[in-house]
Amino acid sequence: MSNQFGAKAMFRSALLSTGSTYVVYAAGLVTSMLIARGLGPADYGRYAYLVWLSGMLVLLMNHGLTTSAIRFVSESLGRDSRVDAQAVHRWFQKRQGWSLAVVGAIFLAALPVLRPAGWEGHLALFAGVALLASFSKAWYLFSISVAKGYGRFGIEAGSVSLLALVNLAGAGVLALMGAPLSGYMLLFLFVSIAHPMMAARQLRQAEIRKGGREVEPGLLERVRPHLMWTMISTLVAAFSNKAVETYLLNRLAGAEAVGFFTIAATLARGGVELLSSGLTTVLMPMLANAYGAGGQERVNRIGSDSVRYFHFLGLLLTGIGFYWATPVIELTYGERYAPATFALQMMVIVRGLTLSYAAFGALLTVTDNQRLRAAESGFAIVVSAGMALWLVPTHGLQGAIYAHMLSTTAVFLFTFACVRVVLKMPLPLGDLLRMSASALCAFALSMGALALTEHPTPMHHLLVGVLYVLTYLAGTLVFKVWNQHDLAMLGQLGQRVPAFKRLAFLLVPWARHV
């Protein structure tokens, strides 16, 4: 099993996850476009609200079980104890079942205040779809989290890719038929239910199953507090990740504002996943496996490198998203959804600049600093709720955008401070500054090029985005962002992909010695 966490296996997993993300994102974008064009801004806003609410229920139903399962299954395997991994699987699965029942009951009790704005259909249809879809997705996420603990990343990649294409085909048929909102809701339910069914079959094939005995007392003493703090962090984070903004928009600004806000959030999240999904998928299992093997020095090295790579990708996302927002919205959703453009630009800026938050969070989780994660989440919900309650009632959609930007930045700075003060892990501040300088130069040149056109067209924005990417990449060479360690990694990967070996050779004159 250890070979599942070797460098080559991790690289294959990262490529597989990245490839599946491209498929899912492309299919999801077209699906969203078809639904939006078929329903119009108001009904699409109600559909988006349903999907968002279902996602919130999933977060509450999982409440940290998935994160802790990955951690302790992977760590047990790092100690070469498959029996412990199966026992941990059994312990977490039992609690997952109880969680589904409790959260489902709370949702039904709160249903009158959770209905979509302007909803005129049967409330039972809305409740049934939201509840069954969330049950299915929560169980699916738990299953694939256990699989990730075993290093089996292909289970998620294969299932989400196939079902994204099924969803796309279904949305296309419904759009041709001129189906109403209820038709798209039932399609959402069907695809959600299919997820855990596929995962269960693949877990059986991989011989991943729960054990028959209880978790050892010594291990359980570590599992319980980790889950408790992870649960607190997850539950609080669930209400701080655009949740308050979305709910207030539904109650105060109407369904159309929810639709615009959701489109921007979906595209921004898709951009993040396209660039960083491979690294994000393998990071926590790699850190946990190294931690279980007793390699704190290795954990620090992986963490430092991941911060560099996340920041590099985040600055790449910032420029692309800012310049491509206008053509993407106009060409995919149409002019009726133009208000989503500004929201998308602001979201990709803040998400790009804070992308290394994923690395900080994984480091705190793996090194048993869950109390800090809980404190961070508490800080997040206070800031997020405060900003949203202050800005959304008076400024509507723009208020939700600014509230999201302010709260995201504040939480990132808080987490960064925790990593620096508590973990005392050396961070590559010099490299981060070099990358930032490269991005600023690229942005200045790109803005100058855009200013030369009095009335820029979507094509102008696309070309300027390409200019930003090329200038930014060149800037990382001029400012010597990359070092000999990076080239060594590329050389190792070049044993399987020759292009990486050639790239490493070309970068030699531009790399720093470490």
Image (cartoon, helix red, strand yellow):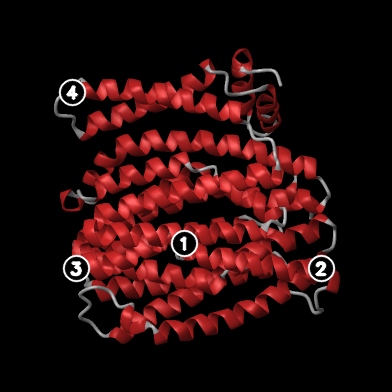
Three-letter residue code for mark 1: Ile
- What residue lies at 44% left-to-right and 75% top-to-bottom? 133
Mark 2 falls on what kind of element? helix
- Say if mark 4 contacts mark 3, CB within 8 Å: no
Residue found at the very far top of the displayed protein: 509
Of tags 2 and 1, which is closer to the observer?
Answer: 1
**Mark positioned earlier in the residue sequence (2 or 4):** 2
Left or right of residue 9, residue 32 in this image: left
Question: Relative to 465, is 61 above or below?
Answer: below
Q: Residues within 10 Å of mark 4 (few under 14, many from 20)?
A: few
Query: How many angstroms separate mark 2 from mark 1 (CA)?
Result: 31 Å
Q: What is the three-letter code of the residue carrying label 4?
A: Thr
Residue at numbered disc 4: 453
- Looking at the rendered image, the disc whose residue lies closer to the viewer, 4 or 1, is 1
Query: Mark 3 or mark 1: which is in front?
Result: 1
**Among the 4 quarters of the image, the one containing residue 244:** bottom left
| Tag 1 residue | 381
User: Tag 4's secondary structure?
Assistant: loop
- The vertical placement of 420 against 229, above or below, is above
28 sits left or right of 253 in the view: right
Q: Which mark is residue 219?
A: 2
